[in-house]
Image (spheres, rainbow, N blue to C red):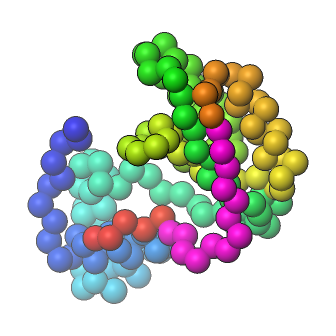
Amino acid sequence: MPPAAPPLDDLDRRLLRRLQRDAAQPLEALGAEIGLSRNAVWRRVRRLEEAGLIRGRVALVDAGRLGLGLTVFIAIRTDRHDPAWLDAFAAAVRDLPEIAGCYRVSGDIDYLLRARVADMRDYDRLYQRLIRKVPLADVSASFVMEEIKETTEVPV
């Protein structure tokens, strides 16, 4: 379990909300929005990074404009639950750049993957590469027809 986050005040929360929307904002602009000086904002951001609350700053890329317009959720069942299989599965998933998320879940399936591919043919290539890397008991896919909400923001 990760260590507990340091206590956050209202300014920290406001800062985190704004950074999640646009981490490229100049410190002066952030400070003006939340009522702090540039240096005070810098110190808070640094403290939040050191505490692990801010894990990194990234650019959000439009997958559709890159030709990866199909999102697929891949449900996986396995009949293996030993550490060696899990290590092989985790390595396989990490090695496939199309896979954007991998989650061990409760319920009828064991793992849920989220991937971005160009089309059905591209998904089939991903599927073939995955099953060559690790044995799976059952794989099913659901293709996103409409993206209603997609965000990287965490409620603060």
Q: Position of residue 119 (x, y in %)?
A: 83, 56
Q: Give 68 or 136, whichever is nearer the viewer.
A: 136
Q: Is residue 37 visible?
A: no
129 left or right of 153? right
The residue under the point 18% across, 52% down is: 5
* Residue furthest out toward the right: 121
> Which quadrant of the figure has residue 92?
top right
Please say whether residue 154 is one of the residues in the magenta stretch.
no
80 left or right of 124? left
Q: Give 104 or 149, whichever is nearer the viewer.
A: 104
Q: Position of residue 129 (x, y in %)?
A: 76, 30
The residue under the point 83% across, 53% down is: 120
19 left or right of 44? right
147 left or right of 27? right
Q: Position of residue 112 (x, y in %)?
A: 53, 45
Q: Which quarter of the image is occupied by the C terminus?
A: bottom left
Q: Which residues are magenta?
A: 139-151
Q: Is residue 156 visible?
A: yes
The residue under the point 15% across, 48% down is: 4
Q: Position of residue 141 (x, y in %)?
A: 67, 49
Q: Which quarter of the image is occupied by the N terminus?
A: top left
